[in-house]
Amino acid sequence: MNLAKKIVDDFVSNDVSFITTVPCKQLASVIDEVENNDSIYHIPANKEDEGIGLCAGAFMGGKRPAIIMQNTAIGVTINTLVTLTQFYRMPLPMLISYRGELGEPVACQVEMAVHTKALLAQLNIPTYHFHRSDDVEEFDRILKYTFMANKPVAILTDATFWGGY
Amino acid sequence: MRRADILREVAPLLREHLTVCNIGIPSQELHAIDDQPSNFYMLGTMGLASSIGLGLALAQEKTVIVIDGDGSVLTNLGTLPTIANNEAPNFVLMIVDNGSYGSTGDQPTYTGKRTSLAGIAKASGCENVIECEAKDVPEQLAAAVAARRMTILVAKCESGNEKMPVITMDPVAIRDRFMSAVRA
């Protein structure tokens, strides 16, 4: 299965038309699909909190937004998630590469991996963890859930899900 | 002239468009001077007014005016390359540059020293960058809106705040009211 294509097809079928990205090697194929999809405005951000600001504006302008980023970004977006996305009650699917899990070659990535789920839980952000490639089948329903609930929702995708590095 | 004096001067123009206003005293001053459904007040999240405004401008066609500050732009400098590379003709970023962090006690920022936000905006690739004195802001802002060209307006003014009440509106009410104005 082409995971990146399935994910972007689900974004499109759920009317997600504004996507901001901060690069990750593990997410490169999704970012390419987003860039090449005519029904999505792709706006690379220089930092993830900036990206969440862009998404807030796009949502108020009538578009369904999403952000694609690494789990290290949880560390730099907590204030924005709490005082903007949650405080004003806005939906935001966050497709996140879960670096620092099984297969990870870079030790430093583990240091944020061990905090990732705890931080998301502390923020009361609904969190899904894609580990097997079949887990992608839930992505469509997670998007519908996100826009129903008007909340930020995290989808962690680890190296096993992507088939290694 | 201080920030509040500029806001009083441009309020009649802002009322005609969508306005995204920076956190803290700027939002308190605009709210007290001319509260409008078309104003989005930031109650938190320093630095993201320009990002919210750009996302809004890219998502729909109405003119978006962002009231930002020098301190807030300095905290989110990555916004200027993003603005420059995602052209939105309906986007005007007005940076009230008073050389100080007004909401936290007027500590000096670097723009009151050696740093030029207009210079950074130009180097970031923004094509229409105007730096002007406070007294010229109404004319420059009106021209930027009328031209429908993405513009960065750096408004140099004196530091200092006016004593205005804290905004007690519920954030969801602010957002819902604003989104109705966007759709109107």
Image (cartoon, coloured by chain):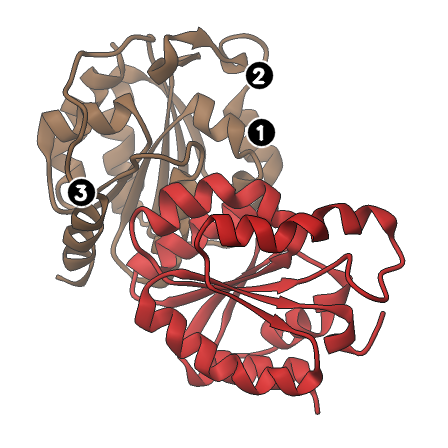
Residue B150 appears in the figure:
no
Name the side, left or right, on which B122 lies relative to B46. right
Q: Are marks 3 and 1 on the same chain?
A: yes
Chain under label 3? B
Tell me the brown chain. B
Q: Residues within 10 Å of mark 3 (few under 14, many from 20)?
A: few
Q: Is residue B183 above or below residue B10?
A: below
**How far across and how far down the image is residue A16, in percent?**
43, 74
Q: Is residue A46 left or right of residue B42?
A: right
Single out the mark in the foreground, 3 or 1. Answer: 3
Say what amino acid the circle numbered 2 marks.
Thr
Q: Amino acid at mark 3?
A: Asp
Circle 3 residue: B170
Question: Counting residues from the N terminus, which is met first, the one under dot 3 or under dot 1?
Answer: 1
Query: As rendered, which of B94 and A53 lies closer to the eye?
Result: A53
Confirm whether circles 2 and 1 share one chain. Answer: yes
Res. B115 mark: 2
Q: Residue at x 18, y 46 (%)?
A: B174
Chain A tint as drawn:
red
> Residue B106 at x, y = what percent?
38, 8
Q: Secondary structure at mark 3?
A: loop
Outermost residue on the bottom side: it is A1
Label 2 environment density (alpha carbons within 10 Å; few <14, some 14–19, many ≥20): few
Depth check: give the residue in front, B136 or A135.
A135
Q: Mark 2 to mark 3: distance in Å?
A: 37 Å
- Label 2's element? loop
Q: Is residue A101 above or below residue B94?
A: below
Within the image, what quadrant is residue B35 found in? top left
* On-image quarter of the C terminus of chain A: bottom right
